[in-house]
Amino acid sequence: MAEARCRVVVLISGTGTNLQALLDTFAAADSPAEIVGVVSNRPGVGGLERAARAGVATAVVDHRDFPDRAAFDAALLDKVASFAPDLVALAGFMRILGAEFVRHFAGRLINIHPSLLPRYPGLDTHKRAIEAGDSHGGATVHFVTEELDGGPAIVQAAVPILPDDDPGALAARVLTVEHQIYPLAVEWFASGRLALRDGQALLDRQPLPAGGYRFEE
């Protein structure tokens, strides 16, 4: 009997390029993970179309339909849980998740953030890195905790900031490495190599450094 694949639900808010990277990586029946659902907080976005083309179930939980964040979070939790995920991957999901949602999926909830965390949590990461005179920007995959963009790092990839970079140019270059490191992190989790234990990210049962595994192209 074939071993069950890791069931992954992806949360999106937009075009879904990181979602596409995951769909492409885990399309084969013998891959360790399977994208079983895609949930968006915004209707009509490109990521939902990408999922539909791949034959993946989709759902919309529109935050504008709820009176407050707690009600939205409760509905989102119910919808995501209905897919019985082993892993929930945030891929450009532009809502801050409440504590109850984070606690429910603790240890199986990951995010990709477009900076070299702990530098620049939150928004406008590329603009902030350029204005600070940083030599590099990049992306970090991390476990999600109740601290915004503050969970233990899993893997990081850095890209140089060039003298004539603007935020758009840097964002495009960072996106190329996002598409490499996010499937890698999901593959590690799906293969049983990655875990969160006592607030520490472990790869092959060994603690990862503070910034996570350093990915080199």
Image (cartoon, rainbow, N blue to C red):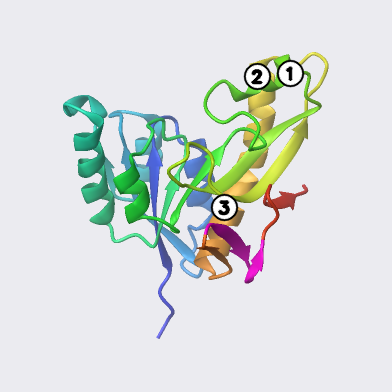
Q: Residue at x 78, y 48 (%)?
A: 216
Task: Give the class, few, some or many, for how many residues have Cα within 10 Å of label 1's Cα (few <14, many ≥20).
Answer: few
Magenta segment's dominant SS is: strand
Q: Is residue 142 left or right of residue 82?
A: right
Task: Give the class, few, some or many, for how many residues have Cα within 10 Å of label 2's Cα (few <14, many ≥20).
Answer: some
What x and y, as percent, mark residue 50? Answer: 41, 40
Q: In the rendered structure, which amino acid carries the disc numbered 3? A: Pro
Residue at the spot of label 3: 183
Residue range highlighted in magenta: 199-207
Q: In the rendered structure, which amino acid carries the disc numbered 1? A: Ala
Residues at marks 3 and 1 touching, judged by CB atoms closer than 8 Å: no
Tell me which label, 3 or 1, sits earlier in the chain. 1
Q: In the rendered structure, which amino acid carries the disc numbered 2? A: Arg
Residue at the spot of label 2: 128
Instruction: Give above or below for 87 relative to 150.
Output: below
Secondary structure at numbered mark 3: helix
